[in-house]
Image: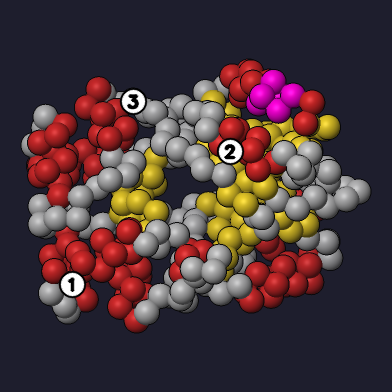
């Protein structure tokens, strides 16, 4: 996290102008430039720099899992040997049904798990079969595990920058 | 538009998509060009027209098949923080606690999950200090201890979902 640098004024305005989405018009960056009162070349240069520097992960579409039929969502959690979590976490992250994979702190005694891998599938049995694949991959390095299915979305918005969202 | 959906459980039925819709969704989960006429470039790659692509994207957004189309900012690189957190909510208090948690603008996502820790949410703040403040507000509002699970390490994943 050493490379974290807060957005400068222009980046902040760019984030606010695009956080609802990119304009669906033939020349979207021109429209943004007009909104921001700058040249389109500046908008494109800065966006490209933010993408290059990892300040933008990617530009594109965010699908709704449920609308695509991925109605089952299981958060699989694992108590993995600390000495091996780096190597095993990388391997789990590369499985194509894992959409997020993180090492997180345990909260003992309530929560012994330190590896979180989100698994999406078209039904619960598919998710459980994927979880078994993860278990096989982890082998003896895994001491305990669980999978928490989501039963309701209570809120889904995302970070809103700008203060009045 | 990134429509807010803080209402209770919202699970649209699987959408009816044709082959071009699927190709658009599969092709556009990243790599959108930064150029004068980016939609025209992408349309050419997909074998369709710019007008058709724009109309389809609008329709997919309106139908909430896509929740958003645009740049995805890496908030942590911009100085912000995301933290996963959980509560063990007594069943009889679930709705009341959900309302209290969802009322905080820092709560970006909130899911009910089947476990003793039955409420899992993501706190998203523009600065690192915001997380502790949000956690304290949730504990004060609910009287329940917040279990915070900040990420120690992120493992690479290919987040694309196949339509």
Residue A42 disc label: 1
Give a yes or no on whether discs 3 and 1 share a subunit: no
Separation of marks 2 and 3 at Cα, in angstroms: 35 Å
Residue A62 seen in render? yes
Instruction: In the rendered view, tell whether residue A5 sits above or below residue B156.
Output: below
Residues shaded magenta: A134-139
Q: In which quarter of the image is residue A32?
A: bottom left
In this rendering, position of residue A137 left or right of residue A2: right
Q: Which chain carries label 2?
A: A
Q: Tell me, yes or no, whether the highlighted magenta stretch contains residue A137.
A: yes
Residue named by callout 2: A90
Check the image and report above or below for A33 versus A74.
below
Where does label 3 land, which residue? Answer: B16
Q: In percent of the image, x 83 and y 52: which residue is there?
A: A107
Dot 1 or dot 2, earlier in sequence: 1
> Mostly what secondary structure, the magenta segment?
helix
Percent position of residue B116, x then y:
83, 42
Q: Which of marks 2 and 3 is in front?
A: 2
Q: Which of A5 and A124 is in front in this view?
A: A5
Q: Is residue B5 found inside the magenta-colored segment of the image? A: no
């Amino acid at each position: 996290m050493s490379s974290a640098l807060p957005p400068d004024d222009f980046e902040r305005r760019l984030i606010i102008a695009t956080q609802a989405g990119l304009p669906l018009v033939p020349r979207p960056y021109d429209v943004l430039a007009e909104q921001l009162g700058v040249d389109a070349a500046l908008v494109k240069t800065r966006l490209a720099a933010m993408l290059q520097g990892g300040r933008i992960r990617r530009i594109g579409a965010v699908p709704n899992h449920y609308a695509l039929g991925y109605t089952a969502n299981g958060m699989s959690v694992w108590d993995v040997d600390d000495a091996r979590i780096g190597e095993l976490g990388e391997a789990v992250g590369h499985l194509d049904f894992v959409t997020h994979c993180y090492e997180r702190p345990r909260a003992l005694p309530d929560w012994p798990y330190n590896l979180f891998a989100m698994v999406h599938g078209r039904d619960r049995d598919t998710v459980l079969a994927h979880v078994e694949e993860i278990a096989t991959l982890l082998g003896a390095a895994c001491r305990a595990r669980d999978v928490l299915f989501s039963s309701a979305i209570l809120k889904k918005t995302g970070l809103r920058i700008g203060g009045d969202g | 538009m990134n429509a807010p959906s803080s209402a209770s459980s919202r699970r649209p039925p699987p959408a009816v998509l044709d082959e071009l819709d699927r190709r658009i969704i599969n092709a556009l989960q990243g790599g959108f060009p930064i150029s004068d006429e980016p939609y025209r470039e992408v349309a050419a790659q997909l074998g369709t027209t710019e007008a058709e692509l724009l109309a389809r994207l609008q329709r997919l957004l309106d139908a909430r098949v896509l929740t958003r189309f645009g740049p995805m900012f890496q908030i942590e690189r911009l100085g912000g923080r995301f933290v996963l957190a959980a509560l063990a909510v007594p069943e009889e208090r679930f709705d009341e606690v959900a309302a209290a948690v969802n009322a905080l603008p820092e709560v970006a996502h909130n899911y009910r999950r089947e476990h003793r820790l039955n409420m899992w949410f993501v706190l998203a703040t523009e600065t690192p200090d915001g997380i502790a403040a949000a956690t304290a507000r949730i504990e004060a509002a609910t009287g329940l201890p917040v279990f915070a699970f900040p990420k120690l390490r992120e493992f690479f994943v290919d987040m694309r979902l196949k339509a």
